[in-house]
Every structure is written in structure tokens, then in C-alpha cells.
Amino acid sequence: MTSPEPTPDATTNTSAGDQADPPGTNSPADVPADLSARLPADLIITRCTALVHDEHEQIGFVEDATIVVRGGRIESVTAGPVDVDVPVAEHTVRIDAHGQVAMPGLVNCHTHAPMVTLRGIAEDLPIEEWFNDFVWPIESNLQEKDVELGARLACAEMIRGGVTCFADHYFSMDTVAAVTAESGMRANLGQAFFSSQGAEGREQSLEFALRHRDTADGRITTSLAPHAPYTVEDADLAATAQLAREHGLLVHIHASENRDQADTSLARHGRTPIEVLAGAGLLDTDLLIAHGTGILERDLPVLGRATGRIAVASAPRGYLKFAWPTTTPVRALRELGIPVGLATDGAASNSSLDVWESMALTALVQKFTEGDPRWLTSRQALHHATLQSARAVGLGEEIGSLAPGRRADIILVDVSGPHTQPVHDLAATLVHSARAGDVRTTIVDGRVIMRDRELLTLDVPAIVGEMKERMPVLIDRSHGKRVQEYDS
């Protein structure tokens, strides 16, 4: 279990110029030995304001910072100009980021990337009609090409919004893996399955996870992806837990998505969805629970007894659209030491893959739910967007902060626009004023995949053009088929 989220800094009005001795700066002696070889730097970012964490995970800002990247990892984050001793070469990329904030890349902790093809297809509906009358009938039409185009468009949207890593839970995931590799993004991918598929669905999920684990130069990690306790039987959940332990895999599952699911589970089985997961042994594995707005008071001690690394992904925009009466209990989960990562869910329900919006809504909804304007501060929201989200997808030691040895997943955010000026509190500006469109540059593993708003790995007009040609066949519901029945 990870340690609880830190309390906010005592200083609540820290702008880029307020910090005399910022946390997170380092001297050459701080650079890990395996990164100190005198090879040329791959990337040098200068004159930025860097968002960093100190040893207590408090967020601060380094003004006029220089970030040096070598071998896909951050070598140093220092205040002031680059050290003249840092060797460079013809291939070294230099970025002058004056007026921009360097941040760890955002993580979308739960989505269904190919579902951007269904953006806006089923609006203003309760979830039962959304699933049964639109989404699951349309998904019965899905072809591999539809998944490919949806994944391409989703990756483009996320890159432009500063998302460098996403956790995906869908079908035809070999195709999504190929698109992820081509896009340059990082991802944790899981092949979803239902018990209605028989043992074959679970076996395919495992085969996918083992086949693609640590591919794309290590940028792709994998998970087992049972859909939910209401579509996957107890025996299949228990078998999944055993496979996860045997192979050291994360399990990514929808559970207690809303209060109705929890109430229905209690009425039918005498157990909540969280208790079902516990009974199957899934709380003794590394587990990512999608949504969790139906987590009840009785579930908290169950989660507290978990021996696995448990995390929850929260996507508040969708909960508001579906008019769910409760939201993810972030404060209670924090007290248990359970990280809550930020997510969007699929664009079919959320209409967006904008994690900036998820960050702002998380802060606002939590304040409203708790009746406490001091809860979920801007710095806490940034912590959820960075380190907590990295931990949620099992990458807490690799990404989530700008620190020596971490993978160089970095975004540069322009805060010079009229909607972000003046800057009295840089953390608040980033959470409540900045937008996805303010991301100027996106970097993954030290490779620039968007620079000055230009996508370098994906061709959006070509993707959209081909997608439009396929749309009439994809959205046809006249056949009356569904991939599954929503009855929870």
C-alpha cells in the first residue's frame, strides 16, 4: 500500500517567483551513477519553470530551470543555465521554454481509447439505455480497422492535451498496442473479457498481456482486464487473481462504478462489488479499480485489509453526465493510503479525453461533496495528476515526477495567455485556469512527439477522413445484436 497523499503546503500562494529554495533541485552528485556517463545529452530544456516534488512529495516550482535528458531518462533538474560540462552533440534537441511550465506528463488512468468513434452518439441518457440501446449494439459492429482509427484519433487527442501515458481496457488490443507504439505514447493495455465468452476470453486476455508486456522499447505495460463483477463470474475473477499472481500482472477492472451497482449486488448476492473482488482474491493482487463511486462505508475496512497495491481511477465528468448521486470517495481512500488517479473513461460517455478537465472537476466536485473549500487544494489536485496517477497504473517508480532517474515524460505548458494571467498562485493557475490547448510540447521517453502544437507522429486529417467513410456501417443498430446486456 502506498503512503497517503501529502497535506498541502503551508504556503498557498506560491508563484514561479516565490520560491527561494525550491524542492526537487539537484546537484551533479544527485544524478544516479548509471546516468552519469559522459555521453551527449539527448534533450536540454532551458528557461522553464519546473514542477517538482520534494522528499515529502510536496509540490513546488523551480524557476528558470534547466532539464537535461539522456537515454530517455531525466538526468538533472537545476535552477539556472545548463552546466557547461554537459556534453552535447549534433543530435541533441534544445528547447527554449521561456514562459512555460515543465510538468510530468499527465496520465489517463482509465479509458477506452477506440471509443472516440462513438463520441456524442448517445447523449442525455441513463446508463442502462446508453449501454443497451446504443453502445453495446454498435460495438457488435466493430472491425479491427475501426479500433485502429479510434485509437489513432484518441492518441492524437491525448498527446495534444499533454497526456503521455494511458491505461486502456478494450477489445482488439493488438491493434491498440500497434498504434500506441507508432504514436510514441506510453500505455498500460488490457484485453477486456466477459464470462459470456467462456474460458477463451480470459485466456486471450492473458495471452495479450504476456505477448505485449514491456514492448515498444518498454513503453507498453499490460494488465488482465475482466470487465466488471456484474459481467464476470466469481470463478473467472478468482482465476484472474491467480493468473495475476503467477505472472506479476496488474488487474484493471470496473467495480462499484455507481451506487445502483452496489445496491443491486447487495440485493442479489449479499455482497458489494468490492466484497466480491475480495472474495475472489483480487484485493491481494495489484488492482486498478475504475470509477468506484459506489464504494460504500462497509467497503473501506475491506480495502484497508488488502495486501495488494490497490488504486482507483476517477473520471468525474462522466459521473456528472449520468447524474450519479455519489462520486469517488477520494478523501476516505486517501486515509487508507490508496492512490486515486485521474481518468476520462471513454469519449463515448465523457465526450472528451481531457485530463486537465478531470483534474479541475476532481478538485471542484470533492470540495462540493465534502462541503469543505479547503479540501482538494490545487497542490493536492496536481499530486493526483502526477505521482498518484503514475502509481495507479503501476508506474510509480518510473514516471509521475521530474526527478533524476525518472523516464523523461515531460510536457511544456504555456501560461502566458489571457486566461492564465496574472499568475498569483501557479498551482491554482495550472489546475483551474490552464487548458489542454495550453500544452505546447509533449515528450515521452525523451522523444518529442508534439512540438509547438505540431503532432509529429500522427496525421489527424487522414484519420478523420477515413473514419467518416466507415461511420454509417459502424453505427448501424438495425441488426438488434449486443455484445453484452447491462443488467446491474
Image (cartoon, helix red, strand yellow):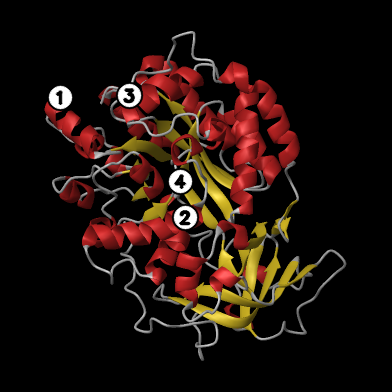
Residue at 71% from the left image edge and 34% from the top image edge: 463
- Residue named by callout 3: 231
Please identify, in this view, whether the residue under mark 2 or under mark 3 is nearer the observer: 2
Q: Which mark is residue 357?
A: 2
Above-or-below relation of 122 to 111: above
Mark 1 surroundings: few (<14), some (14-19) or many (≥20) residues within 10 A? few
- Residue named by callout 1: 268
- Residue named by callout 4: 344
Q: Disc 4 residue type? A: Thr
Do residues under tags 2 and 3 come within 8 Å of each other at their CB atoms?
no
Give whichever of discs 4 and 3 has the lower sequence position.
Answer: 3
Query: In front here: 401 or 284?
Result: 401
Give whichever of discs 2 and 1 has the lower sequence position.
Answer: 1
Q: Disc 3 residue type? A: Thr
Query: In front here: 47 or 123?
Result: 123
Spot occupied by residue 171 in the image (x, y as percentages of width and height): 51, 27
Indicate the quadrant containing the N terminus: top left, top right, bottom left or bottom right.
bottom left
The span from disc 4 to disc 1 (Cα, nearest Å) is 30 Å
Above-or-below relation of 373 to 301: below
Spot occupied by residue 60 in the image (x, y as percentages of width and height): 48, 78
Residue at 39% from the left image edge and 56% from the top image edge: 361
Please identify, in this view, whether the residue under mark 4 or under mark 3 is nearer the observer: 4
Q: Disc 2 residue type? A: Glu
Residue 187 in view here: yes
* 118 relative position to 96: left or right: left
Q: Which mark is residue 452?
A: none
Residue 410 in view here: no
